[in-house]
């Protein structure tokens, strides 16, 4: 696997090795020992989640607060997304900055999102299947988020706003300035 740290410290792009032949392909998506060694961290994932969405669905920006904060390892099984992370660590030199990357079934690229980050994605192809591992269990009372189109974050979602499909819950999220961090 190839690992590259993004401009946001602790957030890594992971490109697994893909073995292809006439039968198809093989890829080891996750190996805890190799993963921890390559990233220089010690993380243990305890929950796997998966969602299926249509083109134009925007999910996010979400995160968990306090002791329920979650690190995530995200990837696309089928289709394509624009994945977005926002550094919400108030003591970070990149606090309030974001990083975007296209994840797809073709590139098999993964993104490690550390605790203290907001996360969201925009689905770019119909019937996209998005998968992510979490290092902490979900807790409804600790759930938080930031409005996707916050003017201070200035995220370019590369999609016409009128074509976005967003849940009512996500449309009611606070701005970055008013978010619980």
Image: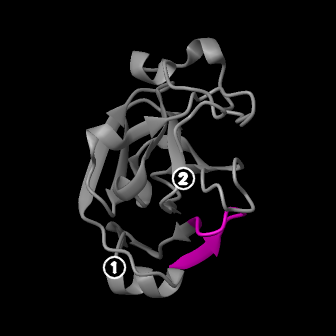
Sequence order check, earlier mark of 2 and 1: 1
Q: Which mark is residue 117?
A: 2
Q: What color scheme is it? A: one colour
How far across and down, in percent of the image, does residue 94 sit? 73, 58
Crowding around mark 2 (Cα neighbors within 10 Å: few <14, some 14 to 19, many 20+) is many
- Asked whether 27 or 101 is in front, the reply is 101
Q: Residue furthest top?
A: 162
Q: Which mark is residue 145?
A: none
Taking the magenta stretch, the answer to whether it contains residue 45 is: no
Q: Residue at x 47, y 76 (%)?
A: 17
Residue 77 drawn above or below residue 53? below
Crowding around mark 1 (Cα neighbors within 10 Å: few <14, some 14 to 19, many 20+) is few
Q: Foreground mark, 2 or 1?
A: 2
* In this picture, residue 31 sits left or right of residue 172: left
How far across and down, in percent of the image, does residue 39 sit? 52, 80
- Asked whether 129 or 105 is in front, the reply is 129
Quarter of the figure that contains the C terminus: top right
Which element carries disc 1, helix, strand or loop?
loop
* In this picture, residue 90 sits left or right of residue 164: right
Residue 124 drawn above or below residue 39? above
Q: Residue at x 65, y 71 (%)?
A: 5
Q: Residue at x 50, y 63 (%)?
A: 114
| Image-quadrant location for residue 168 | top left
How far across and down, in percent of the image, does residue 177 sit? 66, 33
Q: Which residues are magenta?
A: 1-12
Q: Residue at x 63, y 73 (%)?
A: 4
How far across and down, in percent of the image, does residue 119 sit? 51, 45
Residue assigned mark 1: 31
Mark 2 touching mark 1, by CB under 8 A?
Answer: no
Residue 46 drawn above or below residue 127? below
Calculate the distance from the C-alpha at mark 2 to the C-alpha at mark 1.
23 Å
């Amino acid at each position: 696997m190839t690992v590259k740290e993004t401009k946001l410290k602790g957030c890594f792009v992971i490109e697994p090795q893909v073995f292809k032949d006439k039968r198809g392909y093989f890829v080891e998506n996750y190996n805890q020992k190799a993963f921890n060694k390559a990233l220089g961290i010690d993380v243990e994932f305890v929950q796997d989640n998966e969602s299926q969405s249509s083109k134009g669905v925007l999910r996010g920006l979400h995160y968990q607060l306090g002791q329920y904060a979650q690190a995530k390892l995200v990837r696309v099984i089928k289709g394509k997304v624009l994945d977005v992370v926002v550094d919400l660590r108030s003591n970070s030199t990149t606090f309030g900055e974001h990083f975007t990357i296209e994840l797809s079934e073709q590139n098999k690229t993964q993104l490690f999102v550390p605790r203290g980050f907001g996360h969201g994605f925009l689905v770019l192809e119909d019937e996209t299947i998005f998968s992510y591992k979490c290092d902490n269990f979900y807790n409804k009372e600790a759930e938080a988020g930031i409005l996707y189109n916050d003017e201070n974050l200035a995220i370019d979602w590369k999609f016409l706003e009128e074509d976005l499909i967003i849940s009512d819950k996500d449309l009611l999220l606070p701005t970055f300035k008013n978010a619980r961090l």
